[in-house]
Amino acid sequence: MNLFIASTLTWPGRGITVQQTTTFPETSTSRLTITGAGQIDLRIRIPSWTSGAQVLVNGVSAGTTTPGSYLAISRTWASGDTVDVSLPMALTTEATPDNPAVRAVRRGPIVLAGQFGTQNLTALPTLDPATLTATGVPLEYTTGPVLLRPFYKTHGQRYSVYWSVTSTPPPLPAFVAHYPFDETSGTTVTDATGNGRTATLTGGSTRTAGHSGNAVLLNGSTTYADLPVGILNGATAFTIALWVRVDTAAAWARVFDFGSGTGIYMFLTPRSSAGTVRYAITTGGAGAEQQINGPAALPTGAWTHVAVTHTGNLGVLYVNGAEVARNSALTVRPGSLGSTTQNWIGRSQYAGDPYLAAAVDDFRIYSRALSASEISQLQ
């Protein structure tokens, strides 16, 4: 399997058919379905541009994937067997060989072109990568008034695939933001770090007694906290830690969800459809999520401390100060999400998901991964 194109292989002499179903590159996933039975040495290309690729045979990992190589799956196949391939696609800039300040924008292997309509360009357009914002349409971003879309979809207008890159996101402080929610009224939530990242309560949120002092009370239908745009922009590591008292255990409610729509986000849900707490991050929608799945859902009716840390490829999930799950193949960083525009406590990027019915207290964001001992000290 070399190319990710909807196609069918029929092998008459073996009585086997392999059908590939995909909408790549609009999505980063592909499924192979086997019809017939017999032994095949199936080899799947893992492109050099991806990181953290996953291949599942009937829902079970087929082994370690190495970018720039093939994953070989040798087995006796049965009719109805499936192979699911996920190839995360990061948003990156690639420098030209002769000038590192001149760059092209890529999403995975796809070069994006700025759409300039009838505007004549007399010089390279400038680009601050921190301003790239997902539109919600696959493979489309904006920077200011300019739309970027795949070069192969660009026709009948002025365009540019090269940019003069002006800057990179400024470094984040180690302690990015801290929301104790100790205000007694109003919609403003003060950032206790002094960094000025003020949050706003929306939808009629109120306060209640917290784990310490006050907490924000979210009603599960209209209320959430809105955090500043790009709150983790440029971060290569992070920790988010908080106290939460879940009042209603609705599947897919969000403790937090930082993103720019349903294609680019990172979230923590107290209960997934599998019935367990889950952290996930993606730049390619639900099919490309990289996850940490806990052993159980967060409890209801009791204050629970939850923390997620990520550094390098390692993500760790803590509940009440104890590690409950980890994933050492998390290759998507918060910085890969760009300057996220919808950073919420208690609300999902997906309109059909329920709002969080819970109280939240002492919400902390760091641009580094706290150690296990540091997490325990937050109890």
Image (tube, grey):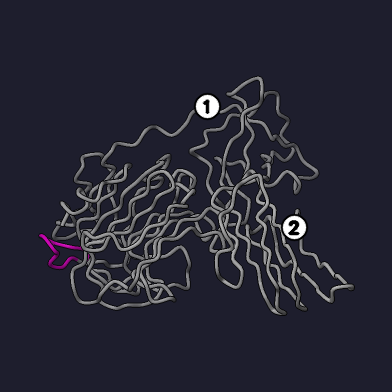
Q: Quadrant of the N terminus?
A: bottom right
Judging depth in this view, the residue of 341 and 237 nearest the camera is: 237
Name the secondary structure under disc 1.
Answer: loop
Decide if residue 109 is on the left or right side of residue 353. Answer: right
Q: Which residue is mark 1?
A: 166
Does the segment drawn in magenta span residue 375?
no
Q: Which mark is residue 157?
A: none
Magenta highlight range: 207-216
User: Quadrant location of the C terminus?
Assistant: bottom left
Q: Is 250 displayed left or right of 264 in the figure? A: left
* Residue 364 percent location from the top left of the image: 25, 51
> Which residue, given by chain and number where applicable, does mark 2 sit on?
1
- Crowding at dot 1, Cα within 10 Å, few <14 / some 14-19 / many 20+, comes out as few
Using the rendered view, name the quadrant where residue 109 is placed: top right
Q: How many marks?
A: 2
Three-letter code, disc 2: Met
